[in-house]
Image: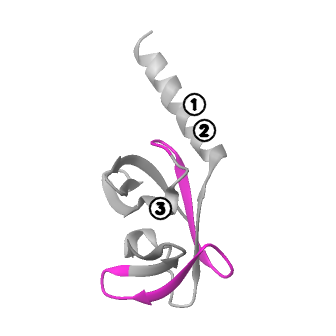
Amino acid sequence: MLQVTIDRFEGNMAIVEIDENHFSKIPELLVHEAKEGDIINITAGKLSQYYVAKIDDYFVYVLTPKGKYAIPHDVSDHAKVGDYLAVEINPTATEVKKSKIHSLMSSLFE
């Protein structure tokens, strides 16, 4: 499983932070209920949301009800053709991160 944080949205793409200072883009459709700051779990496996139809040197191509979308390898959780990708909001991790940020900001302004 790979965890990424939604940094922002630009057009129809979600800019996700993979780790400190490493960002990537994924189609907004795959995280349509997420908002900035949410932590997303991306898991490759069987019987999940998006079918991995093709892989090339740069992208993993997933099939959705609305068409085929390219996801960069760095956010594909090492998916293989025939796998499925689950893309889900992790509310617990999101709240923990928001709480840490709030504590840090409070300590800075005390």
The Cα atoms of the two marked residues, 2 and 1, are separated by 5 Å
Q: Residues within 10 Å of mark 2 (few under 14, many from 20)?
A: few
Lower position in the chain sequence, tag 3 or tag 2: 3
Residue drawn at the location 61% of the way across and 46% of the way down: 93
SS class of the residue under badge 1? helix
Whole-percent x and y of residue 97? 54, 39
Instruction: Return the residue nearer the eye: 28 or 102.
Output: 28
In the picture, residue 105 is in which quadrant? top left
Q: Which residue, given by chain and number where applicable, does mark 3 sit on?
A: 29
Question: Does the CB distance between marks 3 and 2 fall below 8 Å?
Answer: no
Lower position in the chain sequence, tag 3 or tag 1: 3
Identity of the amino acid at label 2?
Val
Q: Which residues are magenta?
A: 35-59
In the rendered structure, the answer to whether residue 90 lies left or right of residue 63 reads: right
Q: Image height check: is 58 above or below 29?
A: below
What label sits on residue 96 in the rendered view? Answer: 2
SS class of the residue under badge 2? helix
Q: Which residue, given by chain and number where applicable, does mark 1 sit on?
A: 99
Q: Nearer the viewer, mark 3 or mark 1?
A: 3
Instruction: Return the residue nearer the eye: 30 or 90.
Output: 30
Identity of the amino acid at label 3?
Leu
